[in-house]
Image (spheres, rainbow, N blue to C red):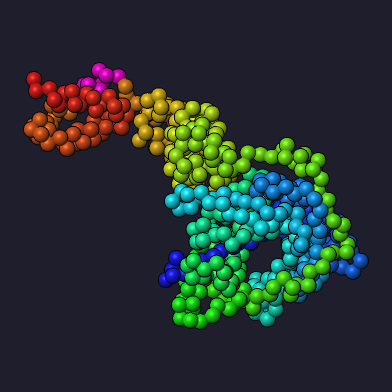
Amino acid sequence: MLHGYEPVIGLEVHAQLTTRSKLFCGCATTFGARANDQTCPVCLGMPGALPVLNAEAVQCAIKLALAVGNNPVGRSVFARKNYFYPDLPKGYQISQFEQPIVGPGRILIETGDGTPKTIRLNRAHLEEDAGQSVHEGYPQSTKKSYVNLNRGGIPLLEIVTEPDLGSPDEAYAYLTELRAILQYLGICDGNMEEGSLRCDANVSVRPVGQKELGTRTELKNLNSFNNVKRAIQHEIDRQVTLCSQGEAVEQCTLLWDVDTQTTRVMRTKEDSHDYRYFPDPDLLPIDVSSEQVDLVAGCMPELPRQKYERFIETFKLNREDAARLTVDKELAAYYEKVVGGCNEPKLAANWILAELLRDLKQVEGGLAANPIQAGQLASLIQMIAKDVISGKIAKDVFAEMFRGGEDPESIVDRKGLKQITDTNALEAVVKQIIENNPGPVSEYRNGKTKVFGYFVGQAMKATKGQANPALLNQLLKQHLENQA
């Protein structure tokens, strides 16, 4: 709430489906191909070319419906959405309007204080993507714009929420949960950098307690979750300032400028009637049967929310660690393999979340480029749990594993890093340190117990960090407190 106002936010997410071909033709969907290489008369809108629906895209939509609690059994109809852009060769986009394939559903998120909140979904509908206008990088880019139609016809699911989000942080949490669901289902890779997940935000503000919604604006060009947060907050602040000064908010579409962290008007906003929707005469309705839905339901994977709850119950993880581990399908699978190899779920979570993810930030490719296999990390954790090496030495071993992918056992053997657990050997070290440091010994015995850390440091230095910490502390206290 800001100066007596509260924000109301709804999101529209375009998720590119992981089909090998486009929605209505056989052209490939590979990212990064040469401009206009992945086109044909259908996706170029040539006269007489007829669309044929990709059945795999329908399966993807059914999976999402089941994941968000919607029953997709029934009839769905394609419509033509008419507008004129240079990168829309047909002059219309094949989409869905009155009868989408996925109806109302819900996604559960957690707010900043951990409180669960249900975000209602209005719908999710199949549609083809438009092409791409290119304004730089080509000859005469200062005078001309170019059009790449490789994206034209790419299959999308547009997922639309109700205006249930109340802050930029909630929008971020919703996007994180939605992307995880899409990735777990295997229907979208969630890669915003390649444009396979795109988000538009509808933002309005109203006086606290008012039921009626304020005038909304639509934010576009949001190419990361952080930019979604920043853009929404900027727009909330702008609208609250206008309303506080007695000025009206104009309904329009705004572009988010990443460089200046501000918005600019793209166009005054169209309403649905401006698109002149009508059923596409070239495509038959989709009739989703209960048998088809049952077949898909039998192949549904464990979803991120289910895995999150299971990690808490089975592995006794706290909610924050469970959330971080399950937000990415591959990371969750890696964690379970590590735990399966060492049976130390909390230690495994700590090493993955603190050490592994920190180092992966420094390499391209993220988890896919991880040089440490799950079995290797499990072996390292077992060595710590069995007191073969100390936690401090383990960090050095981990760093070497990350650099070269070597097994932890061979590193420890090669460098002679095994922890010293022999009481007689450590006792000899402790006696020598006490004999060499009469001043600190006298201070400790006169009540200055903080000097104990000095003795620990000296002992670790003498043993090159290989002394068993618990045994070392026990022997030091025993000999320091012995006045004889």
Front-lying residue, 225 or 131: 225
Residue drawn at 46 percent across, 37 percent down: 317
Residue drawn at 78 percent across, 72 percent down: 276
Q: Main secondary structure of the magenta part?
A: helix
Magenta stretch contains residue 105 = no
Query: Vertically, is 319 above or below 378?
Result: below
Front-lying residue, 393 or 191: 191
* Rendered location of residue 428, percent (x, y): 21, 21
Residue found at the very far right of the displayed protein: 48
* Rendered location of residue 234, percent (x, y): 49, 70
Magenta stretch contains residue 423 = yes
Quarter of the image with the C terminus is top left
Query: Vertically, is 385 above or below 321?
Result: above
Please indicate, yes or no, whether residue 77 appears anywhere in the rendered image. Answer: yes
Could you tell whether 387 is left or right of 308 in the image? left
Residue drawn at 37 percent across, 25 percent down: 387
Could you tell whether 389 is left or right of 67 in the image? left
Front-lying residue, 92 or 21: 92
* Rendered location of residue 61, percent (x, y): 73, 50
Quarter of the image with the N terminus is bottom left
Residue found at the very far top of the displayed protein: 424
Query: Vertically, is 218 above or below 283?
Result: below
Magenta segment: 422-432
* Rendered location of residue 369, percent (x, y): 56, 44
Please indicate, yes or no, whether residue 13 appears anywhere in the rendered image. Answer: no
Residue drawn at 83 percent across, 64 percent down: 279
Asked where in the image residue 351 lies, by quadrant, the reply is top left
Query: Vertically, is 354 above or below 196?
Result: above
